[in-house]
Image (cartoon, rainbow, N blue to C red):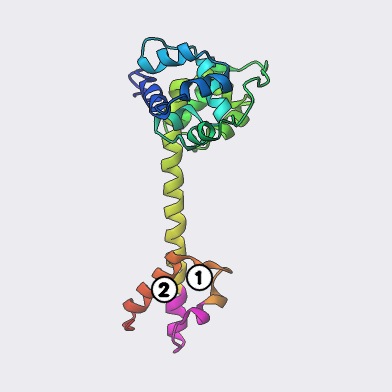
Amino acid sequence: MSFSSGVFSWEPFFTSLAACLQEKGAYSKVARMTGIRRELLYRWTEGTYLPILETIFKLCYVFDVTPFQMMTNQTARLRQALESETAVRSPQFQRHNRRVDRERCQAYLLAVLEGRERPQGLRQIAQCLGCNLRQLYYHFPQECALIAPLVQQYRRQRKEERLDRVREQVRQAVISVHSLGKYPSQRQLRPLLPGGLMRLSEAKEAWRAALRELGFAL
């Protein structure tokens, strides 16, 4: 799917849904839990009927999954609900009549996609914009589908940057202890580092790497 070209397809959503409904009686279970007719669900997965967005979001609400999670086969909650035959939420969720400033919302979402705003979760974005998550998905399905993977990538990048800082902190502590003529054991490092940092596997690996750099045999 491409934001710049305006091409967006719900096909992965329905393909994923069909994969979850292969067990006997699954369509009936979903129909009972969501209030969506079984015949319509069959037409969804057969590709002969495209439901309105509100109905798609209703299914997602009942099983506590997002459209993006469905599109990327993150369907554990849906499968668990089918196995237990228990909906996560009631389909009779409260409607929110708060007016959405669509121009402001779209400008912000574009800024996130273009890198002018920090990526953050769609729920946080909705709160920032003064609307709810369902409204955001309803009015801006393409933007939401494109922002979700950006957020995951951003979080992975932030995690790696944090671990790089941890590695450098450990390396500098090892060098500092060694410069005093002491063996830079983990016990010697702990007073120089934030509490609990040496429990991280990345910190321990950085410690071993720094020892090798100083010529210590492990």
- Magenta highlight range: 173-189
Q: Considering the image in quadrants, where does the C terminus appear?
A: bottom left
Residue holding disc 1:
198
Say few, some or many: other residues with alpha carbon within 10 Å of mark 2 (under 14 / 14 to 19 / 20 or more): many
Residue 194 placement (x, y as % from top left): 57, 68
Q: Is residue 139 visible?
A: no
| Above or below, 169 relative to 37 | below
Amino acid carrying mark 1 in the image: Met
Q: Which class describes the residues within 10 Å of circle 1: few (<14), some (14-19), or many (20+)?
A: many
Label 2–label 1 contact, CB within 8 A: yes
**What SS does tag 2 mark?**
helix
Please tell me whether residue 15 is drawn above or below residue 166 in the rendered image.
above
Front in this rendered view, residue 86 or 24 = 24
| Residue under the point 39% across and 33% down | 72
Say whether residue 188 is magenta: yes
Furthest-bottom residue in view? 181
- What secondary structure predominates along the stretch shown in magenta? helix
Q: Is residue 146 above or below residue 167?
A: above
Mark found first going from the N terminus, 2 or 1 = 1
**Magenta-drawn stretch contains 24:** no
Read off the residue under disc 2.
207
Instruction: Residue 59 in the image: state x and y as whole percent.
Output: 53, 22
What residue do we see at 45% from left, 71% from top?
170
Q: Say left or right for 148 vs 196.
A: left
